[in-house]
């Protein structure tokens, strides 16, 4: 950054809209994570703000419609963390299927708790969202001997044929047929709250749900209710509807539930890739040359 002649102010995120409003107006660019960049923040940042560069791929905390209307480019970093998140997905799945967290925790306390787990061989995994991460999950699922079904509005026929993925016409079809349901979709009006009571009722008894997408794609209270009843056999998530969560967040105490603190893309390999990509995007955008990976079509 010093090589660019920039003055840099650092904050520990994710920042709330209120904090972003305090900062807005003093910067030519935001290099952000999951910070609340709303219309109000963008409007207050103008006319000085020239670009927003996102560290990562999830853009749901940025008001993209406002950025497009106000002609502020939004950059992001596709292709830097798909392997890492796919591996984390299977860490959660194996942790739940084999009761690894529960039994390892008991062993550390001197308890020899020999719970009986499940194989994933031969089980059907339903994937919602067949982008880069979803595809990496497919490859690993096939290696484990799982049957794979999926839904994505932008279907890659060649990939599906190569990896024997059965196409589902709707998200509901995936939810009804999967022994495991793995969520890899963006947060949108269509996906917000998609895992809710009436949908859960149509899922298989004992279904395992893995959420490495966004916490808001599930209705927390409904998932907790289904975990307590046994309808959902396990819930593994790297995301919550409130991050960091309050100490009394209901999923933290729910049975057969593993929550990790949004670290699915956080490895020694992927962090430098994300950092360099987001910074390179920013340098190229402000310099007026080079690839920028623009998400909102302004550049």
Image (spheres, rainbow, N blue to C red):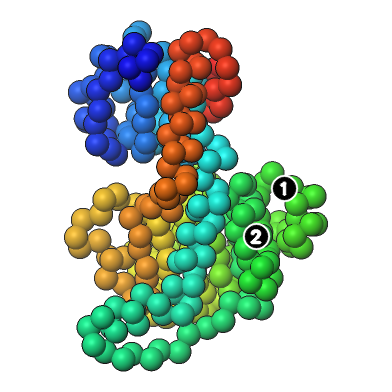
Q: Residue at x 46, y 80 (%)?
A: 98
Q: Indicate whether 68 appears above or below 166.
A: above
- Left of 92 or right of it: where is 168? right
Q: Residue at x 67, y 73 (%)?
A: 145
Q: Residue at x 49, y 72 (%)?
A: 94
> For residue 121, what is the image quadrant?
bottom right
> For residue 236, what is the image quadrant?
bottom left
**Residue 233, horizontal then vertical, whole percent:** 45, 77
Determine contact: label 2, label 1, CB under 8 Å: no
Give the label on residue 155, or none: 1
Within-10-Å neighbours for mark 2: few <14, some 14–19, many 20+: many
Frontmost residue, 103 versus 122: 103
Q: Which residue position is annotated with label 2?
A: 138
Give the label on residue 114, or none: none
Q: Residue at x 41, y 61 (%)?
A: 237
Q: Indicate whether 58 appears above or below 137.
A: above
Closer to the observer: label 2 or label 1?
2
- Left of 277 or right of it: where is 255? left
Within-10-Å neighbours for mark 1: few <14, some 14–19, many 20+: some
Of label 2 and label 1, which has the lower sequence position?
A: 2
- Left of 54 or right of it: where is 297? right
The N terminus lies in quadrant: top left
**Residue 126, horizontal then vertical, whole percent:** 61, 64
Frontmost residue, 52 versus 254: 52
């Amino acid at each position: 950054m010093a090589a660019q002649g920039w003055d840099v102010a650092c904050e520990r995120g994710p920042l709330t809209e209120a904090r972003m409003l305090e900062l807005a107006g003093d910067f030519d660019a935001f290099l952000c994570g999951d910070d609340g960049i709303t219309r109000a923040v963008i409007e207050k940042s103008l006319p000085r703000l020239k670009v927003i560069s996102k560290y990562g791929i999830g853009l749901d905390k940025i008001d993209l419609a406002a950025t497009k209307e106000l002609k502020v480019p939004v950059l992001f970093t596709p292709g830097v963390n798909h392997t890492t998140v796919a591996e984390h997905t299977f860490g959660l799945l194996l942790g739940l299927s084999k009761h690894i967290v529960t039994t390892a925790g008991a062993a550390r306390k001197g308890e020899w708790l020999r719970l009986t787990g499940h194989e994933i061989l031969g089980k059907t995994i339903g994937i919602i969202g067949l982008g880069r991460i979803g595809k990496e999950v497919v490859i690993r699922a096939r290696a484990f001997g799982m049957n794979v079904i999926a839904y994505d509005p932008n279907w890659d026929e060649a990939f599906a044929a190569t990896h024997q993925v059965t196409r589902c016409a709707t998200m509901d079809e995936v939810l009804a047929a999967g022994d495991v349901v793995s969520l890899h979709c963006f947060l949108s009006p269509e996906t917000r709250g998609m895992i809710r009571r009436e949908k859960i009722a149509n899922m298989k008894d004992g279904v395992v749900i893995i959420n490495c997408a966004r916490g808001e794609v599930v209705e927390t209270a409904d998932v907790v209710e289904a975990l307590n009843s046994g309808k959902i056999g396990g819930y593994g998530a790297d995301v919550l509807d409130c991050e960091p969560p309050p100490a009394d967040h209901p999923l933290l105490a729910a049975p057969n539930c593993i929550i990790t603190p949004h670290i699915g893309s956080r490895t020694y390999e992927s962090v430098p890739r994300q950092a360099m990509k987001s910074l390179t995007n920013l340098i190229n955008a402000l310099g007026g040359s080079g690839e920028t990976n623009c998400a909102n079509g302004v550049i």
